[in-house]
């Protein structure tokens, strides 16, 4: 894939009216975290019921290598237990009950839940390469190869790409402009995935020239959702999935 050389100016174009643009995918960030605790089965289920096109979840590994839904390396922020998740076996973690009987679910359970929503997908967010093999194994054991995509930084996604040559990837990118062509050639991502503060119409047009759609995160304000749609993004991730669906409407 080719990209305009760094520093080259993009020529601005008039943005088309939003009703002429395809509806971006509505992605639920860690489920429906304003209603349920993030990265739990109730949160994922609520997001799917609210009409999410995809639900983004974070994955960490237990001591015995089982992928579970958790963003942080420890259980302290979300669950109040100051222990690394990698210090616990999957069996011990599954038996651990927190407030209201809640627990940390396995990735396999989220994939099983996804099976009830045939039009939806799971976006698996990896911050590092270590969980890639176990996460992909859970996907294949669930027969969900065509129901997932992965997002994360380049070093994590390179591990995924080595295992899964065709799975869609969303390259998390926190710098202005595009990645260099050799990285794009190695990763073959479908999406460039920058935070919304880096996204404008010029970026989506440059990405399109390089063969990339643009996904963006984490968009929780109505006006920002509208701005991202006008910018021409293909996917928007939000903590407020019901509001996002309302803003985007149902048409494609």
Image: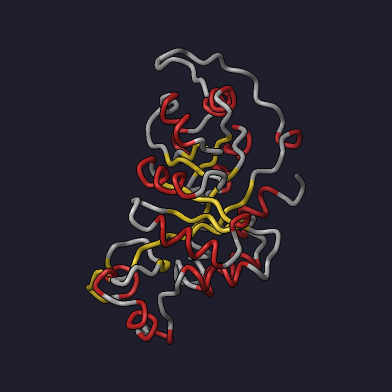
Left or right, residue 86 beside residue 141:
left
Q: Residue at x 35, y 51 (%)?
A: 129
**What is the x, y in percent for residue 186?**
44, 33
Left or right, residue 168 beside residue 5:
right
- Which residue is at the front of the view, 248 or 180? 180
Q: Residue at x 50, y 43 (%)?
A: 170
Compared with 132, 9 (above or below) is: above
The image's colour scheme reads secondary structure
Q: Residue at x 51, y 42 (%)?
A: 216
Count of numbered marks: 0
Q: Residue at x 57, y 38 (%)?
A: 228
Compared with 90, 69 (above or below) is: above
Classify the position of the C terminus by image quarter: top right
**What is the x, y in percent for residue 48?**
63, 65
- Which residue is at the front of the view, 200 or 145? 145
Compared with 30, 176 (above or below) is: above
Q: Quadrant of residue 210?
A: top right
- Which residue is at the front of the view, 43 or 180? 180
Q: Quadrant of residue 87?
A: bottom left
**What is the x, y in percent for residue 69?**
42, 67
**What is the x, y in percent for residue 148?**
57, 55
């Amino acid at each position: 894939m080719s990209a305009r050389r760094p520093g080259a100016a993009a020529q601005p174009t008039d943005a088309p009216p939003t009703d002429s643009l395809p509806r971006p995918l509505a992605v639920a960030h860690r489920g429906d975290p304003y209603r349920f605790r993030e990265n739990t089965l109730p949160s994922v289920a609520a997001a799917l019921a609210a009409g999410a096109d995809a639900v983004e979840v974070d994955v960490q590994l237990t001591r015995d290598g089982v992928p579970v839904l958790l963003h942080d390396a420890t259980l302290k922020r979300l669950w109040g237990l100051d222990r690394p998740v990698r210090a616990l076996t999957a069996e011990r973690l599954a038996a651990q009950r927190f407030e209201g009987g809640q627990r940390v679910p396995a990735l396999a359970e989220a994939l099983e839940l996804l099976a009830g929503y045939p039009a939806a997908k799971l976006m698996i967010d990896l911050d590092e390469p270590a969980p890639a093999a176990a996460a992909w194994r859970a996907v294949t054991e669930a027969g969900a190869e065509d129901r997932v995509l992965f997002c994360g930084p380049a070093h994590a996604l390179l591990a995924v790409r080595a295992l899964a040559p065709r799975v869609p990837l969303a390259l998390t990118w926190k710098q202005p402009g595009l990645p260099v062509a050799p990285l794009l050639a190695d990763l073959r991502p479908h999406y460039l995935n920058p935070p919304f503060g880096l996204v404008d119409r010029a970026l989506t047009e440059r990405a399109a020239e390089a063969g990339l759609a643009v996904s963006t995160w984490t968009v929780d304000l109505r006006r920002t959702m509208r701005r991202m749609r006008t910018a021409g993004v293909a996917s928007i991730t939000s903590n407020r999935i019901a509001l996002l669906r309302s803003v985007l409407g149902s048409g494609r």
